[in-house]
Amino acid sequence: MRRIARSQPGWAERYLADLMAAPGYAGELVHVAALPARNPSYSLPDPPLPPELDSLLRRLEIPRLYAHQVAGLAHARAERDLVIATGTASGKSLTYHFPVLERLLADPRATALYLFPTKALAQDQLHGLERWATLVPALAPALKAGVYDGDTSAHTRRQLRAEARLILSNPDMLHHAILPQHSRWSRFFGALAVIVLDEIHAYRGIFGSHVANVIRRLRRICAHYGARPLVISSSATIGNAPEHAARLCGRPVAAVAADGSPRGRKWVAFWNPAPLDPTGMSRRSANLEAAAHLAALIARGVPSIAFTKSRVAAELVYRYTHERLAERGGGLAERLVAYRAGYLPAERRAIERRLFAGELLGVVSTSALELGIDIGSLDAAVLVGFPPTVASAWQQIGRAGRGRVESLAIAIAHEDPLEQLLMRRPEHFFGRTPEQAVIDPENPYVLAGHLSCAAHELPLADEELAESDGGAAFGPLAAAVTTALVESGKLAHFGGQRFWSSPETPSRAVNLRTISDDTYTIVEQGSEARVVGTVDAVSGLELVYPEAVYLHDGESYVVRQLDLEQKVAIVEAMAVDYYTQPVLENSLQVLVEERRRAWGAREREPLAEATQSLAGATQPPAAGIAGGEAPLLAFGSLAVSWRTVGMKKVQFRTRDAIGYHPLDLPRITLPTRGLWLWVGERILAEVAIDGSPYPALAGLRNLLVTVLPLTAMCDPADLGGIIDTRNLGRPCIFLFDRYPGGLGFAEQGYQRAESVLETAAQLVTSCPCRDGCPSCVALPILHPAQQQDPDLGHGRPIPSKERTIDLIARLMAVSASDSR
Amino acid sequence: MIGDPVLRAKLGALLAGRAAVGTAPAREALRPAPERVLVRGAEPLPGVVENTDRGPIFVHEVRWTAADRGQDQVLAHLAEARERLALLPESDLVPDLLALKRHAITSTLFLDLETGGLSGHPIFLAGFLMLRPGELHLRQVLARTYLEEAALIDEAERLIARHPIVLTYNGKSFDLPMLADRAVRHRIPFRPPAVHVDLLHHARRAFRRAVPNCRLVTLEWAICRRWRARGVESRDIPGIFHRFAREGDPSELAQVLHHNAHDLLTLAELLAHLIPHPPGPRLVLDSEAKPSFAFDHEG
């Protein structure tokens, strides 16, 4: 059925041995780890599966179910919510499909709802289910399914609401379109038997906190129509899958984590491109090295995937690999494809078909593929640089390896201080546990939005908000937040119920994500306009500015025109020998200082009341906070913005810069709230190295971004940290929420700054590294820019651990002496 | 996201309080919200409270005859239209008109709803106009708070069940789906009307070349030749209701009742204008023309 070429046993060891024996090998292979094989563990469901599902297993050529799949089924049959947290390619989706299908077969009225973090995932799963219905026609009545998202036509929506047994959607659609109109869904929700949450590791931080509340609203509405659905979640390997699932659903869950699927031996190799000169300051291009590996693997018939950190890098690696394969001949170049989120659905379908059929041997992708789109497994994964989290890296590595076949992952480092550190000290990678997913559904700012939505859907009753043994669904702060909403006139209280009391629709004002869903369409003008691809609106200004070279599928296009209103970029196909990189300018502006206090003082002794607003101010606001001896802390509204100010032309392969042009494009602004810390002139001077305080300030900033999430219950990616001198005339550390209007993260940092610093101190002093590492003062780039080529060396230097510790010690001395 | 600075400050205080106590803060007891006090001295709304199985509803009822100035014109037009309808051969009539012809005039119910917003918001006013020989019977049902909506829907359902023909303006897109929707929310069984005539569609066909647009208020002056004194704007009505529900000042709401009554009267008069004259010479469209259902206007 899956006819991907099977690689020979021992092939990975041979490949690595051949690399080391090759002439010109310069010791790039700095580390090789071997993870042992694992035997499969099977089990039988008891009672047995219904005949339709047995049929399906036969048609899918699956002889037996794995132990974890049967365990999942057992929990579901016993009405226990569960989370499936086994590894990549362990048959997770079957583990949730089967309990759903059992119920849909047993009860012809029953319905099921599947939620995915992206539209693409929903489409792919639907595709799979439709295929099942053709394989086993007896399943067709249960598999009356459809995707219900922003792209679904009005006609199909009506049909699905009226007739569908199984609906695939995403949390944004549920929040904006489905729940507020729940009376149209009374049939579907009234019979809802199962909710499936797939890829819940994507629901972390701010997004996860919102989604958790959307799930609570969903269950509440089901209860209104008389249903109490089971919740089945599936997660990639993260540090805390069962806790995370429980927090997301609001109920305890059983965990299925023992992976019964077989695994062959897995080799993980670290490859550091050779230095170009004796100083070792610059190295060979990681993109080119990756292309060499990918081409070599494909030439040996090994199905392989390469992951890059940005879209541009994916296109470059694809291009270079294609060239090498074309030189070899034999049609190999046609068996390589580039795969990323900007492709149209039909294109993605075509790629998947060809992969399954064994026509394709190589895929180049950004991390879009981490999110479970089912391409089957491959035998080798090439990581071009490391993704921001250890969990993501293991997911990428996990893409290689099918059944008992031996697999290989090669991680190639860029000229980036962090990646070079991992090459020197691999234990910083292998020794780390995957990150935990953290959410805070009870954040009052988040709650206020969702309680408003909930009240609009169905009035909030006293019993729902009051304490009971099961706990209020929305948490202990729900009553207080609701009272605040009533006092502000948003809700009105009548007869023990709180009603939404405004003509606006509250879900409109609540955005689940920080980036908007807006996309730019990229169109090639010719005799007829042809849509080449799409890009999200934030990346758009950095990828398809006028005169940009847009790479797609190995072809190059030049952007002729960018229409900001219509969100269309017009491109013209043109063969060029260079690509472009935008030059971005980040800036931060303090709008209003709301609060200020001395470092170490308690909050109720503010130095100044909230005063100046920006309108009409000619001087920088909050003048006076910086420039004094004493450390001060302030909190207020900020605007953080990004702008593409120019464009660099870079030659392919050589990476030579061959031109620069200024550009004039609009700014993207994030209005938010944050804190800023001025450490005082004395301390600033004392921690400077060669007159610069930046190594210490950057180290502290990175530690705060790492440590504040523990207090504020957010994700490090939800915070931004900038050292800025322009606003206040002296360098200050700014920390802000990456969400419009802020969600209280930096606010909590302001309230509890001294204890956050203590936690930072414990972290950095107990870190066993010598000079600083990603676990303490260094910070991985959490938001890789899709338009940037990491091969051009944009890494920040690792801050000085020693100076950072010094800075922290001096600040703590101030708060110790001032505390009463 | 949260614009109101006072609300934001309260949420910030909750955040700080949670941090102070730790991860398991004491649950705050639900404070009883202040009861709404009706504004003193304000003129009360016209109407009475009626008790139903689902609780109280507030009803404003008026019966107009030819002796009432303003409504006499409507009655006269309706009477003439009824006579014309009686003379029209059935074969010439579209289904809607046929239904009107076949039923007694007392079988018709004009309906117009006012809501607290677009979909997902409650209905707070259901206005009905019924016809008796020589009499217009207005019955407006008001939900004074969100709690009274269920009873309002019940009453609407009852009236619709008693009248085979329901007439609305844009009711196919708005009023009836809205009623059905809110009924589902309250779990009240709702039967759609036997015949639903949406005058918007007929008005568009008949008048679109004679008027700038087919909004009801436009047709009111262009076709019915009636002008209202300045009243509430439609788009302000939802906010007025929510404010009344929270604060209890009836003065703005009284205007909404007027507005709703006007709309219903215009609806009735519009029907009269839309019933065609018996077959005769083809009409030429002029400003006084009364084009009809039955003729083809392309000629």
Image: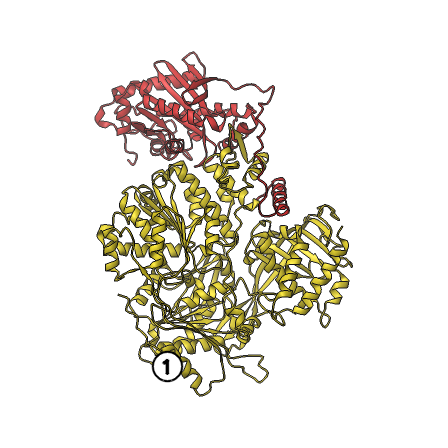
Chain colours: A yellow, B red
Q: How many marks?
A: 1
In the rendered image, residue A65, in percent from the top left (x then y), is placed at: 30, 59
Q: Is residue B36 above or below residue A198?
A: above
Query: Along the horizontal axis of the image, is B6 left or right of A92?
Result: right
Identify the residue under disc 1: A327
In the rendered image, residue A300, in percent from the top left (x then y), is placed at: 34, 78
In the rendered image, residue A407, in percent from the top left (x then y), is placed at: 38, 72
The answer to which of A471 and A488 lies nearer the viewer is A471
The answer to which of B249 and A520 lies nearer the viewer is B249
- What type is the residue that disc 1 sits on? Glu
Residue ID at (31%, 20%): B107
Look at the numbered disc 1 and give the secondary structure of its residue: helix
Q: Quadrant of residue B202?
A: top left
In the rendered image, residue B185, in percent from the top left (x then y), is placed at: 40, 33
Q: Quadrant of residue A16?
A: bottom left
Parent chain of label 1? A
